Image: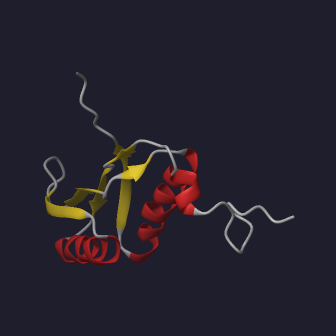
Amino acid sequence: MKNKNTSPYGTPSSARLSEGLAKFKVSFSFFVHNRKMAEALTARLRTKHGYAVDNGPHPHLKGSYWVGGTTQPMALSDYFMTQFVARMVNYTNDYPCMFEGWWVLTSSK
């Protein structure tokens, strides 16, 4: 009998995987080798994913740029974070850049 919590391809559906998980905005950054590519990567992340993204001269590396931003709120699970990191790393194939990493800031009360 087929599990009704899976997609037609046999993997759990996104909605099912995120059910009951807390959602947070994930921040990320890239190191980019030139301004033109920083602008192109910024535009791609905004239009394709709806992320809030900005860019500018890298504060420590003259002539280089950073691209950074935040996602929409997303579930923090191994599955979703693995997909997110793979997507970010794959952008290094299309743009001369390095994915520097991601982090989540939560408020403590």
Q: Is residue 66 left or right of residue 84?
A: left
Where does the N terminus fall, quadrant-wise?
A: bottom right
Where does the C terminus fall, quadrant-wise?
A: top left
The image position of residue 75, as x and y in percent, is 44, 49
Q: Is residue 18 left or right of residue 63?
A: right
Foreground of the two, 40 or 19: 19
The image position of residue 62, as x and y in percent, is 14, 56
Foreground of the two, 1 or 35: 1
Foreground of the two, 28 or 23: 23
The image position of residue 20, as x and y in percent, is 49, 44
In the rendered view, tell whether residue 14 sits above or below residue 95: above
Quadrant of the rendered image containing residue 94:
bottom left
Residue at 71% over, 74% down: 8
Quadrant of the rendered image containing residue 56:
bottom left
Residue at 48% over, 68% down: 90
In the rendered view, tell whether residue 44 sits above or below residue 24: below
Residue at 34% over, 76% down: 48
